[in-house]
């Protein structure tokens, strides 16, 4: 199934909320109307409230439930949450929420000679259904799941039981860290590698994939915009043409801060994937922490644009600039 991004909203009732790993809760929703089963790799948008304001967050569909009429999500409480994951963790049975029908921009391509699925941390939620589908079809696949500690790994016991020796757990504090070069080398010629995890993991895999001379189209990935090279910190943003200047707190995105101060912003995904919220960089005091997957590595390096929904700016000292003092980060931009 190809990409499906047309959003049709409706109500869903919360059937269950339970903890499935440290800081991770499983949320089971019963949509009032489900038009079609959620395909592997799909997600839903869900209406949340952040600081009393309506907003939208996206979560991968882990599975469909025993009767095929429920949607199962896995939600990690982000350490630097802007409020969406905290709202999701506070959901209770019987509560009614607004959700979209399943959306697809990370489809699984069938008919390949082999597959490797690689998840880092909560990225497992995007790959669980893919693993189930590949097993059901008798495909040649390997499932790699990495994290710092077993206690942080959602669904780990169920996945190990389901996939047996095809499941390869890479757990840092058990002395089995992910070997990126070996991971890339294990993908059969003509096969595909599907990755979901934090930005540093994805960057390392993309670099190893290119170094190995593999076909770019055979590396498929999804990321989550809360991950970056640096911990988020507050920074100033200025738009001289509009006469606007505002402070972006550590727990608010640049896009949200610009909307709040009156800038008319374009956006869609809010996950660093679509490119609609891109802004032009006119000046910089600090280092850009690119957290998107829309721009290429060369475009990140150029530093003349960024995706305001996920990317941030850190101070010169945090970014490791020579001779940096303790000044706060700031960026001057223009918007479309």
Image (tube, rainbow, N blue to C red):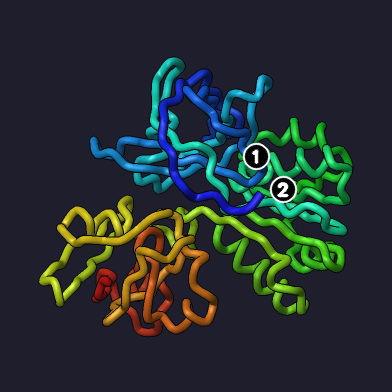
153 sits left or right of 139 in the view: left
Where residue 174 appears, as percent x and y from the top left, is: 74, 47
Instruction: Say which label, 1 or 2, has the lower sequence index.
Output: 2
Question: From where the camera sits, is residue 90 visible?
Answer: no
When the figure is inspected, residue 225 is found, relative to residue 289, above or below; the finding is: above
Crowding near the residue tagged with mark 1, few <14, some 14–19, many ≥20 C-alpha atoms within 10 Å: many
42 or 226: nearer the viewer: 42
- The residue located at (58%, 30%) in the rendering is 72
Residue 27 percent across, percent down from the top left: 53, 28
Residue 153 disc label: 1
Q: Nearer the viewer, residue 43 or 162?
A: 43
Residue occupying image coordinates x 54% and y 35%: 24
Q: Is residue 166 above or below residue 313?
A: above
Q: Secondary structure at mark 1?
A: loop
Residue 301 image point, x, y percent: 48, 81
- Circle 2 sits on which residue? 145
Looking at the rendered image, the quarter that the C terminus falls into is bottom left
Q: Is residue 257 left or right of residue 158?
A: left
- Tell me whether the residue at label 1 lies in contact with that at label 2, contact meaning CB atoms closer than 8 angstroms: yes
Q: Position of residue 13 (x, y in %)?
A: 45, 21
**SS category of the residue bearing label 2:** strand
Q: Of residues 238 and 68, which is closer to you in this image?
A: 68
Distance in Å between CA atoms under marks 1 and 2: 8 Å
Is disc 2 surrounded by few (<14), some (14 to 19) or many (20+) residues within 10 Å? many
Residue 7 lies in quadrant: top left
Q: Residue at x 60, y 23 (%)?
A: 69
Q: Residue furthest top?
A: 94
Quadrant in which residue 310 is drawn: bottom left
């Amino acid at each position: 199934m190809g990409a499906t991004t047309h959003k049709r909203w409706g109500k869903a009732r919360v059937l269950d909320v339970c903890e499935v790993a440290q800081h991770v809760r499983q949320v089971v929703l019963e949509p009032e109307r489900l038009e079609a089963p959620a395909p592997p790799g799909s997600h839903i948008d869900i209406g949340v409230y952040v600081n009393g304001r309506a907003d939208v967050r996206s979560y991968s569909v882990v599975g469909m439930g025993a009767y095929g009429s429920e949607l199962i999500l896995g939600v990690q409480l982000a350490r630097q949450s802007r409020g969406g994951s905290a709202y999701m963790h506070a959901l209770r049975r019987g509560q009614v929420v607004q959700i979209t029908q399943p959306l697809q921009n990370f489809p699984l391509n069938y008919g390949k000679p082999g597959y490797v699925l690689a998840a880092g941390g909560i990225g497992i939620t995007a790959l669980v259904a893919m693993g189930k589908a590949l097993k059901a079809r008798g495909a040649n696949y390997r499932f790699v799941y990495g994290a710092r500690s077993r206690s942080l790994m959602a669904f780990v016991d169920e996945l190990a039981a389901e996939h047996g020796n095809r499941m390869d757990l890479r757990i840092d504090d058990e002395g089995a860290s992910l070997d990126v070069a070996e991971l890339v080398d294990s993908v059969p010629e003509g096969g595909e590698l599907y990755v979901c995890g934090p930005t540093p993991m994805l960057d390392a895999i993309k670099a190893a994939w290119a170094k190995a001379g593999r076909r770019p189209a055979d590396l498929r990935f999804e990321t989550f915009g809360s991950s970056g090279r640096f911990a988020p910190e507050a920074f100033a943003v200025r738009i001289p043409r509009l006469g606007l200047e505002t402070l972006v707190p550590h727990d608010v995105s640049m896009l949200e801060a610009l909307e709040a101060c009156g800038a008319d912003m374009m956006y869609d995904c809010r996950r660093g994937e679509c490119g609609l919220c891109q802004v032009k960089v006119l000046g910089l005091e600090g280092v850009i922490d690119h957290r998107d997957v829309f721009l290429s590595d060369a475009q990140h390096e150029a530093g003349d644009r960024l995706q305001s929904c996920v990317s941030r700016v850190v101070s010169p000292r945090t970014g490791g600039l020579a001779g940096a003092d303790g000044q706060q980060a700031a960026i001057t931009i223009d918007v479309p």
